[in-house]
Image (cartoon, grey):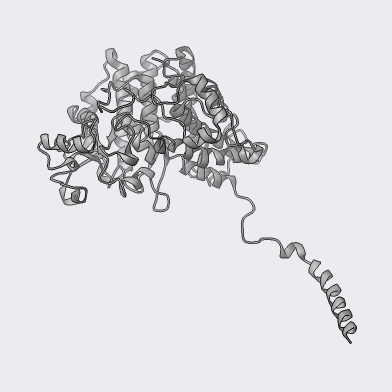
Amino acid sequence: MKKRIEYILIAMVMMVIPSCDQNFDDWNTNRVDATSINPAFQLNQAIINSSASSFGTMVYELGIVQQLISPNSGVLTGANYNQDNRASTQNNWQVYYREVIKNTKDIISRIKDDPTRSDLYQMTRILQANAFLVLTDTYGSIPYTEAGAGFSDQVFFPVYDTQEFIYDQIIRELTEAGNALGAAGSNNETAEILYRGNIDQWRKFANSLLLRAGMRLSRVDPSRAQQIAQTAFSNGVILENEDNAVIRHDNNFLNPIGNTLNATEASNVFMTEPFVNYLRENNDPRLRAIAVRYVGAGSGSAQTVDRQTFDPDLQIGMPMGLDNATAVQRAASMGLVSFYEFSQIDRRRIAKLNAPNFIVTASQTNLLLAEAASRGWISGDAAEFYSNGIRLHMEQLASYDPLSEIPEEDIAAYIASNPLNSQNALEEINTQYWVSSLMNGPEAFANFRRSGYPDLEPNPYPGREVVFINRLTYPNSEISVNSENVQQAISQQGPDNLETRVWWHTP
């Protein structure tokens, strides 16, 4: 009896085995999770994360160029004291490598040989070039050739390339990609969020980045800078605000610096005295559009709407070089209730949660053309480019918030009162570029080093490590994990500190 039962069980098992094999592939196929992703959606992820307004930008770049500053230490230590804080200097590195280049490299590897996605391929090259431009301008030598190849080629310890080599590659990429856009004869890449597939606007974006890269070489290689500026200008650049390269934020994708200034650091970051004074002393209507002061505020919690004023005559910038103790003393000596009375960038307008972030603007491009024209590098009227650059930035402010719109009569009056002086053209143009690049810290920092303007006094903080910050330092994680390649870069470039200059930043 026992054996009969065993035989029956064996027979049942033998019957089940073939039935289990039937439809095996169907049963073991995941029909829910995606197995591939449209590369246009990956490009959108890279676009969103190209927003330059991040916490590290606020701590360093916007402070280095003396637009926004905090007297506080801890996580806010950086340009306020001219001291190294690698928890913040690593910010650009982490965001651009992890969220931008990781995606763009993958897109390129997947579609570079697909003629049906030719335009998306060129768009990706352009956005990636911008990411590498920010990274090399921030740190100098960086991984370029082997960057982002961990997944595709298992390159986990990428070598570092020199900035001179990287600039050659960026210029080539922008030139080739801009020229190749639209070559396939049609474009169906309307899913991307920067220009919704508009080929003409992408081409202007590429040429404007090319102009920016070319002008970076104005000190180290003027003849090449001239040639690149001429090429970019003749190929067509961004000249109107409707073509601006802008990242639009909403309630799902918040402006990074706006998110910070409306949360933990709402009461800790102030507009600087040099920036406020420059705008106020020149009767610049932009001060009313961007600044707020909470009159009589004795604490952060007292910075309420009923205390706010936009009146430019009442704005008071925070002096440079203060810490938490000396800021209290300085405020008292100026007759203020507390240092919470110093002016701030308005977090309910310019720095609100869904504020746009601009990568390249018509204002910036016109001002670079003004410099190129004043140098005799391109045809055109430098004074006209200059006034256009000022006007376009003033008009651009309305895109942040309706309350930041500047009336036409105020724009016209300012331009009429501030024509370009050909004898002082480079300083005037690049000082306006400083104002125009507000909230785009990496670009303001790069052009300040490149041009030498505005003519800022060094941060007077007594415990500063350097007179002026010239670059940001590599992340500790990169030093510990990719040590051999980091040390090779340092041996060529110079010490990994805030004082070492990048290649194009010649004395």
Q: Where 110 falls versus 143 (above or below)?
A: below
320 relative to 437 in the view: left or right? left
The quadrant holding residue 7 is bottom right
Q: From where the camera sits, is residue 388 visible? A: no
The quadrant holding residue 314 is top left
Give x and y (percent) for residue 307.
15, 48
Give x and y (percent) for residue 86.
41, 35
Residue furthest to the bottom in view is 1
Give x and y (percent) for residue 334.
11, 34
Foreground: 266 or 220? 266
- The residue lying at 37 percent from left, 33 percent from top is 441
Foreground: 477 or 60? 477
507 relative to 273 in the view: left or right? right
Q: Where 501 falls versus 109 (above or below)?
A: above
41 relative to 303 in the view: left or right? right
Label total for image: 0
**Quadrant the C terminus occupies:** top left
**Quadrant the N terminus occupies:** bottom right
- The residue lying at 17 percent from left, 37 percent from top is 315
Give x and y (percent) for residue 161.
55, 25
Q: From where the camera sits, is residue 128 visible? A: yes
Residue furthest to the left in view is 335
Q: Where 27 falls versus 330 (above or below)?
A: below
Residue furthest to the front in view is 2
